[in-house]
Each structure stands twice: as structure tokens, then as C-alpha cells.
């Protein structure tokens, strides 16, 4: 697809768009699940970690009050509380929760994994050249993903093609709002000082595209080899960023 002249910004989803879904589902999520218990025990005294643990506990109480039946809470000792909290964290992860406190903790666990060399980011082979090509045409590139901003930066810092963060202009996560909510895209275009029609958003999730398009943002559906094919009749489809040619 040729990108309209007016487009100045390319806004990208990660999972299913820049990066195989399998990287997230088979590498990142299991790594966070395996290391949650150890991470909380090692860092509970850290004020930032502690405040997110408190937020997680507030989430748990809200889930309890909403009759979602989170795992039972045991309050007899510090050990019991940590075990209960970790069990709740696993419960959220099993439900693919997008809760910000959980996402932040996962991001911190991944940060440690990346810095220890136990994790490295993955992108599709067409991504680095596309970033370069788009930038040469004066486009700015932003990321919008439900993974935390920290996790996004780490992924792009450590790809098999090297550090790509110098090509990226900024990052948005669920702190900006849910990806299926039009208001989130309004917040993003305001933040990056653009009109909606100057932004092209690419994602593999039709509901996200619908939300962005309702504001006048240009959209394209990412359909990558190996990922489940989304319903593609409603949006322009891209199979590779090679197809995104700025005017
Ligand atoms: Mg996606």
C-alpha cells in the first residue's frame, strides 16, 4: 500500500505486527511467570516495586468484589502473603490480564532477563529496513503496545538486528489507555502533536484499528505468516513492512 502524503507518523503495534506472537507467548510470558516469585521476594523492599505490589493487591480486591474468584488469600505471615500475591499474579497472567501493575512487574522481570542476557528481542526481517526507509522519508515512528514502555524499549534494544531504538520516536502503553478505546488514540495524536489523518496505525487486531479509524487515523491490518488470519475485508492488509511505501 502507498502511504498517503499527509501521513507523518507511523504508529505500530508489536505482537503480530513487528514481532511474532510466538515470541510473546512462548518466550516472554513464560519467562515472567517462572521468575515472578523470585523477583517479588528479591525486590519487595524497593519502593517502586512495593507500590506496584500494593496496586496489584488493590486489583485483587476489585476482582474479588466483582466476583471473578481470584485465588484464595492467606494472611498468616509475610511468606503466606507473598505466596498469595504470586498466585494472584499467575492467575492474572493465565487470563492475559492487561492490568498496568502486572504489566509493569512483567516489564521489570524482562528488564532483568534482558540485562542478564537470558532474553533477546525479536522482530520480523523486514522491520529494520522499513524503519530506515520510513525515516529517510521523514516519517516519525512510534510504538503502541499493551506491554509496558520499558518492555517495549528492551525488546527493540536487543533484537537479532541490533539496537533499533535510535529509529523510534516514542512509546505508548496501557497507561495511555486500552488499545480498543478511541480515546487512547486521541491521547496519542495530541501527545505527538499531529492530526489523526497524519497518523498511520498498523496492528493485527481489527478492534484496535476500528477504534483508531473512528477518529480519522489511517489504519492497516497486519497479517503475518504463521499468525492467525484476522478478518481482512474491512481494512487495507499488509503482510510485510516492505509493502508500506511512503509517498
Ligand atoms: Mg498485536
Image (tube, rainbow, N blue to C red):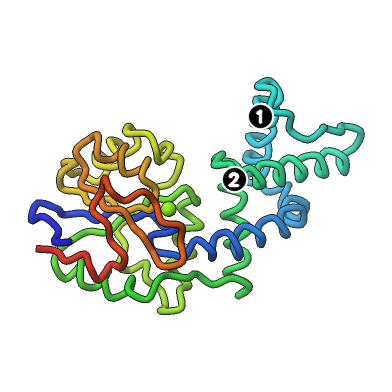
Q: As rendered, which of 114 and 240 lies closer to the eye?
A: 240
Q: Is residue 172 above or below residue 126?
A: above
The quadrant in which residue 53 appears is: top right
Residue found farthest to the top:
65
The residue to which callout 2 is attached is 96
Task: Say which of 52 and 65 sits in front.
Answer: 65
Label 1 sits on residue: 58
Please state the horizontal and vertical placement of residue 167, each as a whole percent of the image: 30, 67
Question: Is 228 situated above or below 71?
Answer: below
* The CB of the residue at mark 2 lies under 8 Å from ligand 1: no
Which image quadrant for residue 61? Answer: top right
Residue 115 position within the rendered picture, expressed as x and y whole percent measured from the top left: 58, 70
Please tell me whether mark 1 sits on a helix, a strand or a loop. Answer: helix
Q: Is residue 171 visible?
A: no
* Ligand 1 has an atom within 8 Å of the beta carbon of the residue at disc 1: no
Label 1 environment density (alpha carbons within 10 Å; few <14, some 14–19, many ≥20): few
| Numbered label attached to residue 195 | none
Describe residue 101's horizontal placement relative to residue 17 as left or right. Answer: right
Amino acid at each position: 500500500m502507498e502511504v498517503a502524503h499527509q501521513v507523518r507518523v507511523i504508529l505500530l503495534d508489536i505482537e503480530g505486527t513487528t514481532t511474532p506472537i510466538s515470541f510473546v507467548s512462548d518466550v516472554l510470558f513464560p519467562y515472567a511467570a517462572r521468575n515472578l516469585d523470585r523477583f517479588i521476594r528479591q525486590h519487595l523492599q524497593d519502593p517502586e516495586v512495593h507500590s506496584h505490589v500494593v496496586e496489584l493487591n488493590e486489583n485483587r480486591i476489585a476482582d474479588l468484589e466483582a466476583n471473578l474468584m481470584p485465588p484464595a488469600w492467606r494472611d498468616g505471615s509475610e511468606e503466606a502473603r507473598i505466596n498469595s500475591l504470586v498466585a494472584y499474579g499467575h492467575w492474572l497472567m493465565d487470563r492475559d490480564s492487561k492490568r498496568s501493575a502486572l504489566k509493569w512487574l512483567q516489564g521489570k522481570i524482562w528488564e532483568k532477563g534482558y540485562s542478564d542476557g537470558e532474553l533477546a528481542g525479536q522482530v520480523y526481517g523486514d522491520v529494520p529496513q522499513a524503519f530506515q526507509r520510513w525515516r529517510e522519508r521523514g516519517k516519525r515512528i512510534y510504538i503502541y503496545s499493551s506491554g509496558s514502555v520499558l518492555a517495549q524499549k528492551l525488546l527493540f534494544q536487543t533484537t537479532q538486528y541490533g539496537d533499533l531504538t535510535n529509529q523510534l520516536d516514542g512509546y505508548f502503553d496501557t497507561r495511555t489507555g486500552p488499545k480498543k478505546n478511541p480515546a487512547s488514540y486521541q491521547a496519542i495524536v495530541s501527545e505527538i502533536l499531529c492530526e489523526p489523518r497524519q497518523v498511520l496505525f498498523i496492528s493485527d487486531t481489527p478492534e484496535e484499528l476500528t477504534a483508531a479509524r473512528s477518529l480519522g487515523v489511517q489504519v492497516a491490518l497486519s497479517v503475518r505468516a504463521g499468525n492467525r488470519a484476522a478478518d481482512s475485508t474491512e481494512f487495507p492488509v499488509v503482510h510485510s513492512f516492505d509493502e508500506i511505501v511512503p509517498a
